Amino acid sequence: MGLDSKIFDSIRTKRKKPANQPDDSGPRCQWDGCDNKGQHRAPVGRDAEGEFFLFCLEHVKEYNKGYNYLSGLSDGEIARYQKEAATGNRPTWSMGVNKAARDSPSQSQVRSGAHAQPQDPRRPARRSAGSRFAPQTRKLKTLEAKAFETLGLSAAATPDEIKSRYKDLVKMHHPDANDGDRGSEEQLRAAIEAHKLLKLNGFC
């Protein structure tokens, strides 16, 4: 059987590229003036979560030497950020405290006779008018305040106002509402993230 047989043709594999031939596929390094492959991700910054630059190995090392996530913040803001980061930037509550027991009147406050106010166990406790939508008494965290600012609302906004404003912004900036134009895609992403954060923290 000769080496030019069709049997050999059916089992031949594709030729591999020579080891010294560079691979031109893939993105390029985003460092000015560099044409190497950009294989290493580097974060863009604090206000661009989830976005990355692509650099070659040499330039990602150079970029990381000068990178400071908290650049531009005061000492007080940095200390506050570190404190909030310890709990994943989420609200916390006291441990070992039963909320229902804490909010209920103590034995000395319970009144009897004509002044007693019996409560039907089948109905929830009455709340004062507007208490559901009362302004937040605790101080807003940095990310919460920024979320309200992104939506163009004050911290006293009700859940319905937050939802309504969020829907308006989505309709305004969605590409489908702008003939496919993605020019305001950043505003759309910011509104989605702001609404998600406020929802996670119980504002809506």
Image (cartoon, rainbow, N blue to C red):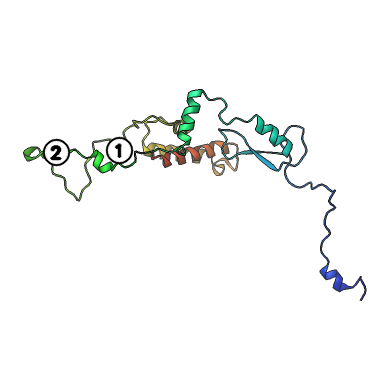
Q: Nearer the viewer, mark 2 or mark 1?
A: 2
Residue that label 2 marks? 110
Alpha carbon of mark 2 to alpha carbon of mark 1: how far? 25 Å
* 174 and 113: which is toward the camera: 113
**Residue occupying the far bottom of the picture:** 1
**Residue occupying the far right of the picture:** 2
CB-based contact (under 8 Å), mark 2 and mark 1: no
Q: Is residue 31 visible?
A: yes
Q: Residues within 10 Å of mark 2 (few under 14, many from 20)?
A: few
Is 144 left or right of 39, judged from the image as shown?
left
Rendering coords of residue 104 (x, y %):
22, 40
Is 144 left or right of 28, judged from the image as shown?
left
Dot 1: element: loop
Is 135 left or right of 47, judged from the image as shown?
left
Residue that label 1 marks? 132
* Quarter assignment of residue 34: top right
Rendering coords of residue 169 (x, y %):
48, 37
